[in-house]
Image (cartoon, rainbow, N blue to C red):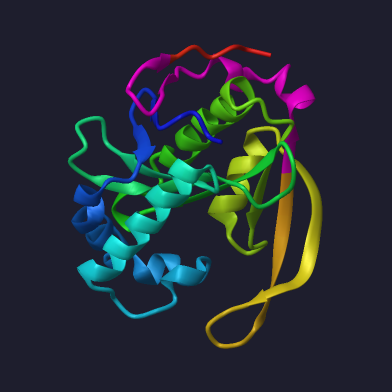
Amino acid sequence: MTQTYRIETTRLLLRCYAPGDAEKLLLSINGSLDHLRPWIPWAQDEPQEIEWTGKFIRQFRGQFDLGQDAVYGIFDPQEQALIGGTGLHNRVGKDAREIGYWISIAHIDRGYATEAVCALIRTGFEIEGLARLEIHCDPENTRSNNIPRKLGFRHEQTIKNSSTDREGRFRDENIWTLSSTQYHTSSIRQTPVKAFDFLGRPITLAPI
């Protein structure tokens, strides 16, 4: 079960979604559909209504509280804007998580995704006690692939015809991995991060 409900970095706040985030999430997604559609399955549909984002937030929160998945919104420190989303997804095996991420079109090319991923790497290894982290992305998604590449992940494999897009075309998938052993010598350990539990209490990060 994920302990970390809130993460603060130099420029960002990552936290579990709350009902009041529905409108911010709706505006962020609907304003970025053309940017997100080539890469993200849930962005394939037409612009959504507030009920759609409300349903997603209820699902995210329920899964978070039950320890089934950990989806975070990426906000500015004042929580005025939803910059994007990320997560430590429980779908790649025991003692491992997959880090996913997306950034709204209004906030790309500022290093926010990299900053969020660094925070989740520290959280995953130093708080959640994971053995491995993975990042999965389309080989053609240059922005997404650049993040694991520069953060020291290893390109393990490319899975051919892993999925289909909205036109029914097959898409490949790159698998990037980072182990706790590799993390031990990583400069990511110096990334400024503050973490908090469900009750808002600070969690001490324990470098491995």
In the rendered image, the quadrant that contains the N terminus is top right
Res. 5 image quadrant: top left
Instruction: Give the residues drawn in magenta, as a range.
Output: 177-202
Residue furthest front as drawn: 66
Residue at point 65% right, 54% down?
136
Residue at point 53% right, 33% down?
120
Residue furthest right as drawn: 157
Above or below, 10 relative to 169: above
In the rendered image, the quadrant that contains the C terminus is top right
Residue 190: x and y in percent read 55, 14
Residue at point 19% right, 49% down?
20
Is residue 66 or residue 162 the one in the foreground?
66
Residue 83: x and y in percent read 32, 46
Above or below, 124 relative to 154: above
In reply to whether residue 191 is colored magenta, the answer given is: yes
Q: How many marks?
A: 0
Residue at point 30% right, 69% down?
52
Residue 51: x and y in percent read 24, 69
Res. 12 image quadrant: top left
Residue 75: x and y in percent read 30, 39
In-image side of 161 versus 67 (left or right)? right
Residue furthest bottom as drawn: 167
Above or below, 185 relative to 146: above
Above or below, 21 relative to 39: above
In-image side of 40 versus 92 (left or right)? left
